[in-house]
């Protein structure tokens, strides 16, 4: 099982669309996957679930989406030159024991030209601090609005490139 984490709580985010594309790619390879969107975290999450003081519901979320996954794909939007605060809050709510030794792949999403290279670097540092493993290939989806048409379809070059990287991650 692979969990794809959509790394923002923003509604109608491009990150969630990319997470769905990752799921479709994994389905084509007949690999089981599930999407965990930070949008589904409770609104009072910052107060109610922090520092390993968890409700049963949140504990079940961690069990299903983190413990229950062999590997994790983080879809990481660029917000103010880094990854979203909501994602850091989520990581601060869990402990390194939850995520240690998991193999992760990071996919950057940005409206700008750098495809999230800075957020990917920042998140790599934090995941290594938590002793998770980060796959060296980190797809960067720059100018994301130009990669998705009005029907929500991605351009074929993006799909091909992301598929190739996910295939390599499956063998990682
Ligand atoms: C709070 C905020 C800050 C942002 N800062 C940046 C930025 O520093 N660089 C950039 O290229 N895009 C920036 N963006 C645009 C996002 O990269 C863009 O919305 C993209 O679609 C990924 O975010 P999304 O998954 O929320 O849609 C920002 C968006 C938000 C909401």
Image (spheres, helix red, strand yellow):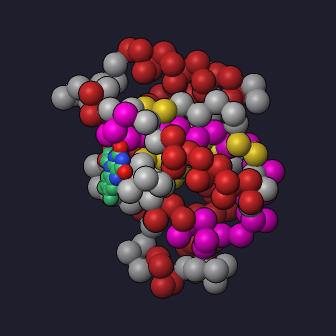
Residue in the picture at 53% in, 70% down: 89
Residue range highlighted in magenta: 89-113
167 within the magenta span? no
29 and 128: which one is in front?
128
Q: Within the image, what quadrant is residue 159 found in?
A: top left
* Residue 106 image offset from top left, x and y in percent: 58, 41
* Residue 60 image offset from top left, x and y in percent: 62, 67
Residue in the picture at 27% in, 27% down: 146
Q: Residue furthest left?
A: 150
Quick check: 143 left or right of 166?
Answer: left
Quick check: 128 left or right of 110?
Answer: right
Image height of 111 relative to 148, above or below = below
* Residue 33 image offset from top left, x and y in percent: 58, 39
Quick check: 167 left or right of 88?
Answer: right
Image height of 87 relative to 123, above or below = below
30 and 7: which one is in front?
7
Q: Within the image, what quadrant is residue 51 found in?
A: bottom right
Residue in the picture at 58% in, 53% down: 122
Q: Quadrant of the C terminus?
A: top right
167 and 120: which one is in front?
120
* Residue 102 image offset from top left, x and y in percent: 75, 48
Please indicate, yes or no, whether residue 17 appears anywhere in the rendered image.
no
Total label count?
0
Q: Quadrant of the N terminus?
A: top right
69 and 159: which one is in front?
159
Image height of 37 relative to 113, above or below = below
Please indicate, yes or no, whether residue 78 appears anywhere in the rendered image.
yes
Residue in the picture at 75% in, 25% down: 171
107 within the magenta span? yes
Q: Within the image, what quadrant is residue 10 found in?
A: bottom left
């Amino acid at each position: 099982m692979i969990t794809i984490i959509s790394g923002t709580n923003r509604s109608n985010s491009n990150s969630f669309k990319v997470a769905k594309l990752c799921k479709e790619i994994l389905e084509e390879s007949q690999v089981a996957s599930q999407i965990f969107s930070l949008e589904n975290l409770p609104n009072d999450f910052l107060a109610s679930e922090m520092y390993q003081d968890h409700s049963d519901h949140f504990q079940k979320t961690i069990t299903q989406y983190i413990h229950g996954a062999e590997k994790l794909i983080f879809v990481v939007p660029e917000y103010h030159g880094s990854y979203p605060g909501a994602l850091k809050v989520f990581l601060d709510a869990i402990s390194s024991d939850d995520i240690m030794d998991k193999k992760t792949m990071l996919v950057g999403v940005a409206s700008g030209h750098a495809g999230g290279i800075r957020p990917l670097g920042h998140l790599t540092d934090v995941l290594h601090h938590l002793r998770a493993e980060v796959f060296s290939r980190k797809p960067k989806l720059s100018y994301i609005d130009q990669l998705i048409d009005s029907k929500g379809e991605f351009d074929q070059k993006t799909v091909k490139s992301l598929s190739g990287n996910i295939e390599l991650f499956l063998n990682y």
